Image (cartoon, rainbow, N blue to C red):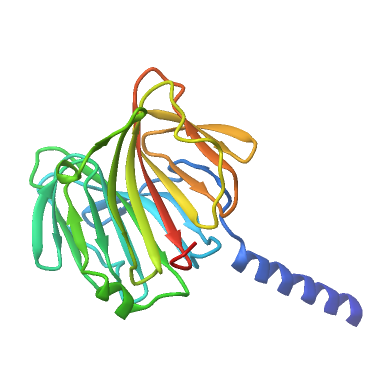
Amino acid sequence: MKLIFTALLVIGIALSVKAQTDSLHAAVYTPKGKPVQMGNVTKQLIILGTTLDIKRFEVYTLTLEPGKKYSSTATDRKNEQLIVVKDGNIKITVNDTAKTVGPGSLALILAGDKIAFENTSAQPVSWYVLNYQTSMENHQRGHDAGPSFLKDWKDLKVTKTDKGETRNVYDRPTTMFERFDVHATVLNNGFDSHAPHTHRAEELILMINGNCQFQIGQEKFQAKNGDAVLMASKVPHAAQNVGTAPCSYYAIQWHLLKGN
């Protein structure tokens, strides 16, 4: 009996450890579960878990009703956030700087900084939140590279390509990463983003408009506006627009080391 109890205890501990260390897999993630009302905002979860380099990774949308305000409480000394406006126009205040921006606009909020939202329009407004913690946090490194910021989609420099458009948003160290790289892509119908390839850095594709087919490993998946596509480290991947209209998405990479 004692041996059986000991064996069960060991199995229980092993399962508990496994549950604590399970990682998110390369896949297309869609909004899941029932939306949760949190004061003036409604939260819709998309991703929650851990990855190779992120010890807590949460991706969700928040929706704010007309005439309402919301101040983020998730960003503290142990969290960093990336905000992307999904739809509508919203007044965003990053620390002491405020601006009204539209869909595709983006804000990087370093750990410890503040962000607030005000919906001055007549329609609900939604935005994506990437909230994350890593074991490589370094507040000095992040602030030495520059402050938290807000970028309006209309102000991003557009580079035309034979496949569509690209907008390089930033590539810099942050409080959570040695290097954090974000760019936006518009992929015309009938084109591939690139041949299937791999890299050490993990990557998140955040769909902005349209539909796109993604190769992950040897399988292909469809992703639409509102979905997030997680590319795990060293997993072959590519994007193909097999639809009849352009699609657009943000490609977000985080790097453990500056050189990888």
Residue 17 in picture, x, y percent from top left: 66, 71
Comparing 61 with 168, the one in front is 168
Residue 12 in picture, x, y percent from top left: 74, 71
- Quarter of the picture containing the N terminus is bottom right
Give the quarter of the image for residue 7.
bottom right
Task: Judge from the rendering whether residue 97 lies leftward or rightward of residue 221; answer left or right.
Answer: left
- For image coordinates 54% across by 52% down, the residue present is 199
Residue 141 in picture, x, y percent from top left: 32, 76
218 to 59, vertically: above or below? above
- For image coordinates 25% across by 74% down, the residue present is 143
Task: Judge from the rendering whether residue 50 lies leftward or rightward of residue 146; answer left or right.
Answer: right
Residue 148 in picture, x, y percent from top left: 22, 65
Comparing 205 with 58, the one in front is 205
- For image coordinates 78% across by 70% down, the residue present is 11
Give the quarter of the image for residue 241.
top left
Toward the top, the furthest residue is 244
Task: Judge from the rendering whether residue 179 lies leftward or rightward of residue 90; answer left or right.
Answer: right
